[in-house]
Structure formats: structure tokens, C-alpha cells
């Protein structure tokens, strides 16, 4: 069963690196589906969203942005057919909604994430098919956001995580410990700063965003004492919206993502020798016994090759968005990850339409690495302004 877990984790992470002189040292976590950008707008801009203008999917990126939404409430649905170059039945669905009570009262947001890994055949060590299962993962969260100042807002969120990789099926013929569904709890903290700047051609907007995501306990899939870190991360973004004239706008965004998860190749291994790579791999027992909070801080300095490798763990995203009358949108972006940390490098494109009560977005990515399974991935988003619907109904009654 451990073999199944490792294979599924590697598949979802899309670690597509070939062996070279330097051994890859990617950050591996439980529930990697939580790190997949669920919405088409962010995906079309290189997977950035921490500091972008508030939208219906702010619950995933930074709920603090909801304080600056143009409407008091809305809901959104997102769908991603995932890794379709490899298999045909892996899907990610994401639902979110929010309600803003007002300047003083703040507001609440919530979301539900469901990731289906399709049909998977569990096999014994000799390759005999034992059972066909449908592994899945889901997460449910709720947030509270509040505007602290004209330019500053903050949010907190609480999340429940659940991962079932074998649908409860176990067989002693597979060897090792039996697997069972795993669960955990996590929390997020978000900050958002957005300030208008007057220019001759109109009002521009400068924004900063910061989040700490998925700070919580580890997940245990078996009773053998092993445990897995969830994808805790620190995200920092900056954005600038530039008005070209009264109707046309350009928005630029850059974002950095650092996983707060230690790697098993670590300078904290017992007997570590920087000149001997055979001493770099932490034992599974020692890795499992790492306290989550200790692991968050240790992740900033555990790279066995020093500061350069630590910096290589930062994933970068950059995107540009053009809008006409804030109704029609065209997007482009780039997401970069170091070769030895995952090599998920993609060029992204997107388009959107916002009219009255409906928002529709679509995105498409092109993998830049050889044989990248993320190539040709599409995402779809459909959002509704609940207060716009309410006003429309009231106007019809009048």
C-alpha cells in the first residue's frame, strides 16, 4: 500500500524530472491537490492570486481580498480536468462563496474542494490486480475577513482535510501496514493592502498580499508511525493596475510561493556530511517524528546544498491582465519551478467575460518542460453576483 501512496503522490505533484548528476530533491506532501490553482483567472496569469484584484475565488488565494469586492455576496464554481495527457478521469472541482456584512462587521467566506483520482487498480507485489478503487481527497473551509483600514484588510480561515487513497480496501497480500483514510485540520492567515494612486490618465491601484496557508497537523495513512506533512506555504505577491484610458486597463502581478515543508534530503540528518550525499537522507522514522511547527521553521534552512538550493524551492509566478471596461479580459502568465524541485514550468493564457451578474473565465497552459503532463491543461470558472441577482429580481417586481 505504501507503493500506491508514493505513486499517487508523485503523479499529482507531476514531478517529471529525469536522472542527472545532481539528485532531485522536491518537496513532497500529503494532499498535493491543495496546491493546484482551482480557478481560471489565476491560472491564466501564471498561478498568481494573493495580491490580484478581489474576485469570487479569493477564498482560495487570500480571503482578505473579499473586503474590497464590488458586491456584498457571490458564489463560484470551478472545474479542472487534471493531467489529461496521462489519464482521462482525474478531476478537480472547487466551489466557493462569500458574504460581506459591511465595513465594520467584516464578512465570511467558505469553500469546498474535491479531487478525484479516477479509477486506480490496487495490485499485489507480483502485479496481480486486487481491487479497483476511486481515490479521492476533499477539503472544507470557512474564513472570516475584515477591513482594518481604507487600504488594509485581514483574514483567518479554518480548514478540514480528508484523503482516502484506497477506499478502505486492504489486503495482507500486499505486505506492510494497512492503509486507512487520513484527515487533518489547518488554518490560514491573510493580509491584503490596496491603495489607489492618482495618475493623469486615471486612478491606478497598487496592491500587496501575504498569506500563510495550511498551517496544521500532519496526516497518517497507516498505523506504522509514519506521517506526512500537508502543503503548508508562505505566499507573497505584488500587483499594479495601470489605467490606459477611461475604458482600458493593464494589471501586472508577481508572486512567490515557498512551501513550509521540510525535505527528507536534509542537513539536519544525523551524521550529516556536506561532502557525502549518502548522509543526506533522513530516515522515515525521524522524518515522521518531526513536529509540524518545527518543520515549518526547519524548511527555511534544511537544504543540504545550502542557501542556493533553499532559494530554488521558491516557485515564481508572473502574469498580466488586459481589461476593457472591466467586462472583457485577456490574460497571460508564466509559472516557474526549479528543475530539481519539480520542474512544473508552464506558459499560461486566459480570457474572461464579466457582465452584470455573471462572470465566466477560461484558461489554458502550455508546458515548457519536456513531456510535461500539465501541458494543455484547461480550467473553467463560472461565478454569480448574488446581490446583482437580487437587484435584478427586485427591479422586475417594480
Image (cartoon, rainbow, N blue to C red):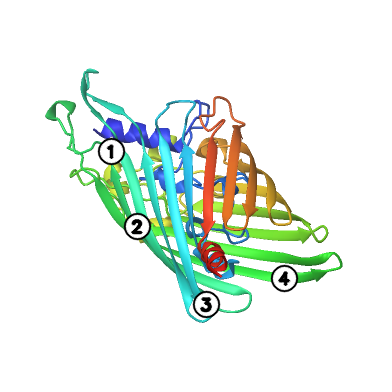
Relative depth, front residue between 277 and 343: 343
Badge number at residue 300 = none
CA gap, disc 4 to disc 1? 47 Å
Residue under label 1: 165
CA gap, disc 3 to disc 4? 20 Å
Classify mark 1: residues with Cα within 10 Å, few (<14), some (14-19) or many (20+): many
Residue under label 4: 196
**Residue at the extreme bottom:** 104
CA gap, disc 2 to disc 4? 39 Å
Q: Which callout, 2 or 3, points at the residue further toward the start of the chain?
A: 3
Q: Secondary structure at mark 1?
A: loop
Q: Which callout, 4 or 1, points at the residue further toward the start of the chain?
A: 1
Residue at 46% x, 47% y is 35
Residue under label 3: 102
Residue at 58% x, 25% y is 370
Tell me: 345 left or right of 136: right
Relative depth, front residue between 282 and 30: 30
In the rendered view, would you say 228 is above or below 67?
Answer: above
Q: Position of residue 3 (x, y in %)?
A: 28, 30
For the N terminus, give its image quadrant: top left
Q: Secondary structure at mark 4?
A: strand
Residue under label 2: 292
Q: Secondary structure at mark 2?
A: helix
Q: Position of residue 314 (x, y in %)?
A: 56, 49
Amino acid at each position: 500500500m505504501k507503493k500506491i501512496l508514493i505513486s499517487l503522490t508523485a503523479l499529482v505533484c507531476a514531478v517529471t524530472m529525469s536522472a542527472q548528476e545532481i539528485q532531485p530533491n522536491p518537496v513532497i506532501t500529503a494532499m498535493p491537490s491543495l496546491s493546484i490553482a482551482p480557478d481560471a483567472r489565476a491560472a491564466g496569469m501564471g498561478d498568481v492570486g494573493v495580491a490580484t484584484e478581489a474576485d469570487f475565488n479569493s477564498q482560495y488565494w487570500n480571503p482578505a481580498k473579499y473586503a474590497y469586492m464590488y458586491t456584498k455576496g457571490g458564489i463560484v464554481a470551478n472545474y479542472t480536468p487534471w493531467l489529461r495527457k496521462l489519464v482521462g478521469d482525474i478531476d478537480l472541482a472547487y466551489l466557493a462563496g462569500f458574504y460581506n456584512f459591511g465595513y465594520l462587521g467584516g464578512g465570511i467566506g467558505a469553500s469546498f474542494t474535491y479531487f478525484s483520482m479516477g479509477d486506480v487498480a490496487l495490485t499485489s507485489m507480483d502485479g496481480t490486480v486486487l481491487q479497483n478503487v476511486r481515490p479521492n481527497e476533499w477539503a472544507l473551509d470557512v474564513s472570516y475577513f475584515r477591513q482594518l483600514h481604507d487600504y488594509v484588510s485581514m483574514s483567518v480561515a479554518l480548514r478540514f482535510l480528508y484523503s482516502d487513497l484506497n477506499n478502505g480496501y486492504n489486503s495482507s497480500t500486499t505486505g506492510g501496514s494497512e492503509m486507512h483514510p487520513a484527515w487533518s485540520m489547518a488554518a490560514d492567515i491573510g493580509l491584503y493592502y490596496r491603495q489607489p494612486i492618482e495618475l493623469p490618465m486615471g486612478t491606478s491601484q497598487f496592491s500587496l498580499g501575504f498569506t500563510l496557508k495550511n498551517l496544521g497537523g500532519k496526516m497518517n495513512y497507516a498505523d506504522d508511525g509514519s506521517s506526512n506533512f500537508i502543503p503548508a506555504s508562505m505566499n507573497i505577491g505584488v500587483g499594479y493596475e495601470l489605467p490606459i484610458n477611461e475604458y482600458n486597463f493593464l494589471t501586472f502581478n508577481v508572486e512567490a510561493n515557498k512551501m513550509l515543508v521540510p525535505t527528507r534530503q536534509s542537513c539536519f540528518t544525523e551524521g550529516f556530511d556536506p561532502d557525502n550525499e549518502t548522509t543526506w537522507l533522513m530516515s522515515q522514522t525521524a522524518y515522521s517524528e518531526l513536529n509540524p511547527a518545527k518543520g515549518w521553521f526547519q524548511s527555511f534552512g534544511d537544504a543540504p546544498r545550502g542557501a542556493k538550493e533553499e532559494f530554488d524551492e521558491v516557485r515564481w509566478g508572473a502574469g498580466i491582465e488586459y481589461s476593457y471596461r472591466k467586462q472583457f479580459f485577456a490574460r497571460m502568465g508564466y509559472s516557474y519551478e526549479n528543475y530539481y524541485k519539480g520542474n512544473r514550468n508552464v506558459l499560461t493564457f486566459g480570457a474572461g467575460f464579466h457582465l452584470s451578474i455573471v462572470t465566466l473565465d477560461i484558461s489554458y497552459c502550455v508546458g515548457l518542460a519536456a513531456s510535461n503532463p500539465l501541458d494543455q491543461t484547461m480550467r473553467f470558472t463560472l461565478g454569480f453576483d448574488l446581490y446583482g441577482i437580487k437587484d435584478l429580481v427586485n427591479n422586475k417586481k417594480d
